[in-house]
Amino acid sequence: MRIVVIGGTGHVGTYLVPRLVEEGHQVIVISRSQRKPYLPNKAWDYAEQITLDRQAAELAGNFAEQVIRLRPDVVVDMICFTLESARHIAEKLTDDVQLFLSCGTIWVHGHSVEVPTTESQPRSPFGEYGIQKAAIERFLLGEAERKGLPAVVLHPGHIVGKGWAPLNPAGNFDLEVFSTLAKGEELALPNFGMETVHHVHADDVAQAFVKAIEKPARAASECFHVVSSSALTLRGYAEAVAGWYGREARLKFLPWSEWTKTVSSQDAEYTWDHIAHSPNCDISKARQKLDYQPRYTSLEAVYESVTWLIQEGEIRV
Ligand SMILES: NC(=O)c1ccc[n+]([C@@H]2O[C@H](COP(=O)([O-])OP(=O)(O)OC[C@H]3O[C@@H](n4cnc5c(N)ncnc54)[C@H](OP(=O)(O)O)[C@@H]3O)[C@@H](O)[C@H]2O)c1
């Protein structure tokens, strides 16, 4: 099949494009060509790379036309962040496109009521990013029902892989948190450390996209969580990280207003966003319908990433 991946050189694309090439697909990757995939892979020699700025083309009103001109059987939209962008492309897709996969986020849920959260629970997103992603999902799945648009929305958790900082046990991206735990030094966590984070390895996200493409009849008109098998509490995550380095985590717990004074305002903002959501998502639907089988637990995914960061000298232990 001819598969166009919009935004295919990032976290997910690094794994998705080689997987698709290896499955024998003709893969066309759209990006601004400003960055390279995180990992080298010979498969990239067989993918066609097209330089195109989505935002600029949307402003010019011709992004969807440029995608259609590539004659895709399948379109993977990794970088849709507004309802307008979703409308721009989805309303112009022709019947030749057999599947349109949009990358969402578990942030569409906002505050969950029951956990693990299932896809069928009512959405209550907060924050512009989650609100827009929920609107995109509602629109695409609505178009699927109204007009038979072959849309699928896949919702990853915190994406982890070799090459970038994973979300840490304090709910932000400060690499020092890993060093602190590895050295057995004291780490402050907000509240009781019982709020949750839910990671997924980028290759498992890629796996879910590939499996949805392989099973269009099961995937179309549906949304799926794409996370590891279990979420982590902040304190459990911190204890596990310390354990990797033969340490016992020395944790102290501070009320939110005090804890924020111990970190930068940027880190406090990241942590707030993550623990206010405290995701804990169920993957039974993806397992049953797509045969999604995550290869990594959250801790395995983070361990691989942290090991890579240590080798690169970005984390000192
Ligand atoms: N990161 C997470 O933890 C996380 C969690 C949940 C959901 N998600 C979802 O995952 C998706 C992002 O996937 P990702 O993390 O693999 O992406 P990413 O690492 O941010 O990479 C973005 C890709 O899009 C390209 N790109 C960026 N702006 C572009 C533009 N204006 N026109 C054309 N190409 C452009 C980039 O290449 P150039 O820069 O060279 O153009 C790159 O190929 C989003 O839908 C996000 O909501 C992410």
Image: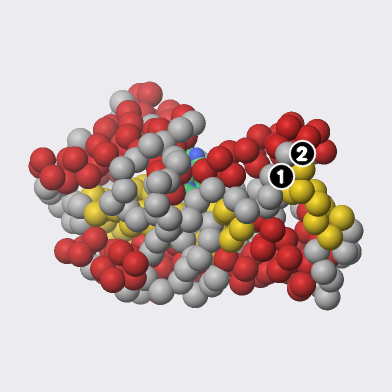
Badge 1 marks a residue whose secondary structure is strand
Q: Look at 78% across and 35% down and name the residue there.
A: 258
Q: Look at 35% across and 24% down and name the residue there.
A: 60
Q: Could you tell which of marks 1 and 2 lies nearer the N-terminus?
A: 1
Q: From the viewer's perspective, is residue 112 above or below residue 163?
A: above
Q: Residues within 10 Å of mark 2 (few under 14, many from 20)?
A: some
Q: Look at 58% across and 44% down and name the residue there.
A: 274
Q: Report the front residue among 300 and 51.
A: 300
Visible residue check, residue 179 = no
Residue type at tag 1? Pro
**Mark 1, residue position:** 190
Residue type at tag 2? Trp
Check the picture and name the quadrant holding the N terminus: bottom left
| Residue 237 falls in image quadrant | bottom right
Q: Look at 71% across and 44% down and name the residue there.
A: 190
- Mark 2 CB within 8 Å of ligand 1: no
In this rendering, would 271 be left or right of 121?
right
Q: How is the image coloured?
A: secondary structure
Check the picture and name the quadrant holding the C terminus: bottom right
Visible residue check, residue 110 = yes
Q: Are marks 1 and 2 in contact (CB under 8 Å)?
A: yes
**In the orientation shown, which residue stands out farthest toward the left?**
147
Badge 2 marks a residue whose secondary structure is helix
| Residue 111 falls in image quadrant | top left
Q: From the viewer's perspective, is residue 87 above or below residue 190?
A: above
Give the number of callouts: 2
**Mark 2, residue position:** 259
Q: In the rendered structure, find residue 269 and report the number of the disc placed on it.
A: none
In this rendering, would 234 be left or right of 142?
right
Q: Position of residue 283 (x, y in %)?
A: 38, 64
